[in-house]
Image (cartoon, rainbow, N blue to C red):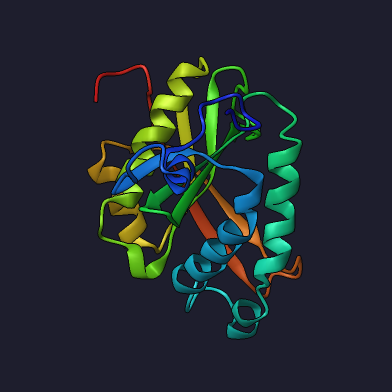
C-alpha cells in the first residue's frame, strides 16, 4: 500500500495491521490525515518560541484547526513537486514536523535553494533528538530533490534555536530581515538567515 506521495506505507500505520513492529522513533513524509496533529504541534511550538516576542493575545488566539486546514490543503495539493512535509514520530505519536519548499527569498534561486518554511517539535518532546532527526531528513530530502543549499530564517533573539542549527553545522549567510506583524510598526520581529549545503559531507 502506498501513500499519496507514492512511498511505502509507514511502519507506524502498518504496525496497526500487525504487519511490522513500531519504530521507536522515525521520520517520514506526512499524510493528509495527520494535518490536525501537525496544526496542534505548530501552535504549541509557536506559543513557546514566540513567548515574549509576540503579544500574549496573539499567541492565545492561535487556532490549531486553522493551521490544520492549511496543512491539509498543502498535503492534498502540494503544487511544486519539491514542496515536502516531513513528520517525526515517537511510536505512533506525531511529535514534530518540518516543511521544505523552494526558496522565495529575493536573492534566492528556487532551482538551487531550498527553504525550511517550518520546523517544530512539541514542547514536551524536545531534547529527545526529534529536531535533529527532522533536520537530517530535511537535508537528505533537499539533496535528493537536487537542491544545492538549504536556508532557514530564525528570530535573532532566539539563542536556543540558533544554537540548534549552528551546532548542526549551519551558519549565517549575512542576510537579515525585519517582519512587521501588523503593518504599522507596532510589532517587529528581526530575523537572520542560516544556511547549509546538503551536498557536503555532514
Residue at 51% over, 73% down: 47
As drawn, the residue found furthest toward the front would be 18
Measured from the top left, where is residue 55 in percent x and y?
Answer: 60, 81
Nearer the observer, 2 or 127? 2
Residue at 66% over, 45% down: 32
Nearer the observer, 14 or 132? 14
176 left or right of 201 in image: right
Q: Quadrant of the N terminus?
A: top right
From this view, report whether residue 138 is shown above or below residue 184. above
Measured from the top left, where is residue 96 in percent x and y?
Answer: 44, 54
Report which quarter residue 124 is drawn in: bottom left
From this view, report whether residue 25 is shown above or below residue 107. below
Residue at 46% over, 30% down: 150
142 left or right of 77 in image: left
Measured from the top left, where is residue 40 in percent x and y?
Answer: 57, 66
Q: Quadrant of the C terminus?
A: top left
From this view, report whether residue 74 is shown above or below residue 40. above
Report which quarter residue 112 is drawn in: top right
From this view, report whether residue 85 is shown above or below residue 102. below
Nearer the observer, 8 or 74? 8
Nearer the observer, 97 or 47? 97
Residue at 39% over, 34% down: 137
Amino acid at each position: 500500500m502506498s501513500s499519496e506521495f507514492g512511498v511505502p506505507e509507514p511502519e507506524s500505520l502498518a504496525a496497526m495491521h500487525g504487519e511490522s513492529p513500531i519504530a521507536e522513533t522515525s521520520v517520514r513524509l506526512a499524510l493528509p490525515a495527520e494535518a490536525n496533529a501537525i496544526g496542534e504541534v505548530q501552535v504549541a511550538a509557536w506559543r513557546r518560541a514566540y513567548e515574549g516576542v509576540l503579544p500574549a493575545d496573539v499567541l492565545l488566539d492561535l487556532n490549531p484547526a486553522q493551521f490544520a486546514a492549511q496543512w491539509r490543503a498543502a498535503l492534498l495539493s502540494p503544487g511544486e513537486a519539491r514542496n515536502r512535509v516531513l513528520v517525526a514520530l515517537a511510536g505512533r505519536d506525531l511529535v514534530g514536523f518540518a516543511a521544505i519548499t523552494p526558496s522565495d527569498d529575493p536573492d534566492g534561486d528556487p532551482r538551487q535553494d531550498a527553504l525550511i518554511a517550518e520546523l517544530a517539535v512539541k514542547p514536551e518532546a524536545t531534547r529527545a533528538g526529534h529536531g535533529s532527526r527532522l533536520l537530517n531528513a530535511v537535508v537528505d530530502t533537499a539533496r535528493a530533490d537536487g537542491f544545492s543549499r538549504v536556508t532557514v530564517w530564525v528570530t535573532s533573539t532566539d539563542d536556543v534555536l540558533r544554537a540548534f542549527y549552528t551546532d548542526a553545522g549551519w551558519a549565517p549567510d549575512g542576510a537579515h530581515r525585519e517582519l512587521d506583524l501588523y503593518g504599522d510598526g507596532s510589532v517587529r520581529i528581526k530575523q537572520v538567515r542560516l544556511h547549509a549545503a546538503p551536498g557536503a559531507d555532514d
